DNA sequence: TCGTTTTTCTAGAACGATCTAGTAGAACGA
DNA sequence: TCGTTCTACTAGATCGTTCTAGAAAAACGA
């Protein structure tokens, strides 16, 4: 932009008041079409690219952007098609409301730096994507007064969220596995702490994410007398599932079923099986969560949740004033595919 | 935030001037530690969450955010680990400079709506990720005077970019294939237009993206007498590669090699081969571009480009004033793996 | 002890738009 | 012709900061 070309400059050039130029951009029906045309064309001549975003944001109190809060490193967050699907749904609604998305990754290690972005960002609202309820960043946002919608159900009744019934969803899978006769399963869980390429066995208390914990409880509910072990190969990712499953498969004490708390992890487990000449559903049952597109290709039994709808719903609750609901529960569905089969008798 | 709590409110409560409160947040060495402490604590009591982002942006002329421009739908953009890697590198640098990333997807169909976000967004600079040179959104940004760095080399000498030598990179692969005796190849190309699940054959003129075109030219350069056909299964994605390759493999006229212009497409091709009992590198050669993490797992021959470095470099050019270069060429490397082998003689 | 530098703080003007309230003139109905 | 409504436009305050200059007080050097 030619330096220093503002609304005022244009107004003077045309010979009208700044308000009128502003209206030419924002309220076309407030002035005659002829004048509007004249204003817009002189604006173009002067190299004026429309009202300044910061000034508009300040005066009108609308930033024109919503923040998206992530736990973990960005690369991990996006390596899961689940996150991508969510974002796509959210972006769809955001676009509809002429709003942009502000990425706000929270590196768990560097809280200071991470929360900094949270303090500085000019946003009207924020989508909280799989961030634990007690995270300090949430307090900052609350103090700042930005509306928040989480993808996890909170305990407080005045919290906004769009989520699924994690326990019920996992219970469906648990029932399915129980019917197939499985009584010895390993659950692959996300664990940001466990760095490196080694698998570790965990206890339920060590599981950091609420939704993971709820899913495990859901499984336990329908499989009360099964042995359920928790194993993590690291962050939520294909490679972690691979690592975790390798460790399980190479151990002396193989389960009859492996459940990934996300499809990407389950797919990693399938990969590990294939590398060992094992057939999912026959030699060992594998199941996942989310039903990402690749799950169908791989024939993975999983719990489907409407990923994109979740993003869309979060967007609507955040941006659409006509949406009254603050708490939306989305349906889930057990999708049985080839990767699950009866437990071998022995 | 308690409504109406501003710098001024805090200043009055403490009994100092607004400037001093501002300094407490931004220039700690401009006031005594004791006073700063007093200001910060009363601010907390009053529920003041720090300087308003919009006001700060207006006054200081810095938005504290850079835009990231995408062609295509967001979901497609992120389904490629290449995009994710780029973004991760960019985010790394952005975090270093306390800057956030503003996602600005451009739906190719709805230019009006898409460019709208481009006009509204409060950003200091923009990363142009795989957007064709002539896109209207770029003109808008230019008029607005925001600095831009593209991931494609432009023709104008005053353009900023961080890129690879596409022709040279593709030529390396072409040479490799030529040496292996391949003279009949199919290139899987990205094609936003081709919707649905059917593969189409294309001409070089129909290829929309500059980088794709350059890669094809690079292949042709080293394989002057080979038959090179272009096939697209849709957007740049695993599924498109799958669809395109299925069509090719099921046709009467199989090539001896399939080249995906991105690894995700090449991986789709491998999937299609496996489903038909074909072994990559033995029955048919498959090669890709980018060297995403999965390429190694799959044993895919590909052209490696430093994905994350690209994001980092774009970030530096955008944000680090001490970086002088405006045009950075990154190195590429041919990575030979099991998926490429000699062409069968006949 | 007196000027000079340094530290610490302040007054008041921007930044570039939008909003509220209101005015001048045209159009209208009787 | 007169009062009323509507249309088209404007003046001036305001959003919440940060910045530029500068002033008062404290510290310093000789």
Image: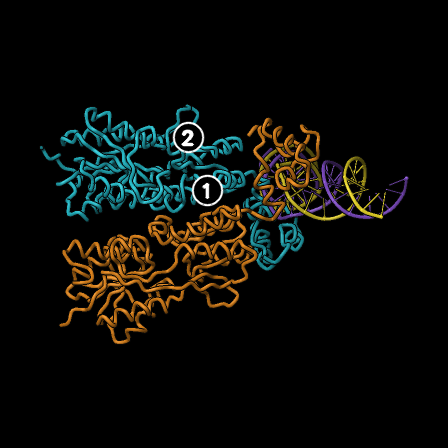
Chain colours: A cyan, B orange, C purple, D yellow
Q: Secondary structure at mark 1?
A: strand
Query: How dense is the environment of label 1, judged by Cα within 10 Å: few (below 14), some, or many (20 and up)?
Result: many
Residue B2 sits in quarter: top right
Q: Which mark is residue A133?
A: 2
The CA distance from mark 2 to mark 1 is: 16 Å
| Chain ID at mark 2 | A
Residue B331 sits in quarter: bottom left
Q: Secondary structure at mark 2?
A: loop
The front one of C28 and B114 is B114
Residue B188 visible to the viewer: no
Which residue was labeled with disc 1? A104
Residue drawn at x 51%, y 33% is A140
Tell me residue D15's x, y (percent): 62, 36
Quarter of the picture containing the C terminus of chain A is: top left
Residue A28 against residue B328 in the figure, above or below = above
Tell me residue B186's x, y (percent): 24, 65
- Asked whether the beta carbons under mark 2 and mark 1 sit within 8 Å of each other, the answer is no
């Amino acid at each position: 932009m030619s330096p220093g070309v503002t609304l005022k400059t244009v107004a003077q050039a045309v010979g009208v008041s700044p308000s009128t130029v502003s209206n030419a951009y924002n309220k076309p029906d407030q002035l005659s079409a002829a004048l509007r045309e004249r204003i817009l064309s002189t604006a173009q001549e002067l190299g004026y690219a429309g009202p300044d975003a910061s000034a508009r944001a300040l005066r009108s109190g609308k930033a024109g952007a919503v923040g998206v809060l992530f736990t973990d490193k960005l690369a991990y967050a996006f390596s899961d098609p689940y996150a991508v699907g969510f974002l796509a749904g959210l972006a769809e609604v955001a676009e509809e409301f002429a709003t942009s998305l502000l990425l706000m990754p929270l590196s768990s290690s560097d809280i200071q730096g991470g929360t900094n972005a949270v303090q500085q960002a000019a946003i009207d609202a924020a989508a909280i994507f799989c961030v634990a309820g007690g995270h300090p960043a949430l307090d900052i946002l609350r103090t700042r007064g930005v509306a928040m919608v989480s993808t996890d159900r909170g305990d407080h009744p005045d919290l906004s969220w769009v989520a699924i019934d994690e326990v019920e969803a996992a219970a469906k899978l648990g029932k399915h596995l129980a019917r197939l006769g499985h009584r010895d399963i390993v659950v692959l869980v996300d664990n940001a702490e466990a760095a490196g390429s080694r698998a570790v066995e965990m206890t339920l208390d060590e599981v950091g994410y609420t939704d993971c914990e709820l899913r495990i409880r859901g499984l336990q509910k329908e499989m009360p007398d099964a042995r359920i072990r928790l194993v993590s190969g690291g962050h939520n990712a294909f490679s972690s599932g691979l690592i975790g499953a390798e460790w399980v498969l190479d151990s002396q004490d193989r389960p009859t079923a492996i459940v990934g708390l996300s499809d990407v992890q389950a797919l990693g487990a399938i990969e590990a099986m294939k590398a060992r000449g094992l057939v999912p559903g026959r030699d060992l049952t594998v199941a996942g969560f989310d039903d990402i597109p690749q799950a169908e290709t791989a024939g993975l039994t999983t719990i489907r949740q409407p990923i994109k709808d979740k993003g869309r719903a979060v967007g609507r609750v955040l941006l659409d004033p006509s949406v009254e609901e603050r708490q939306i529960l989305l349906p889930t569905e057990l999708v049985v595919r080839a990767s699950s089969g009866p437990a071998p008798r022995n």
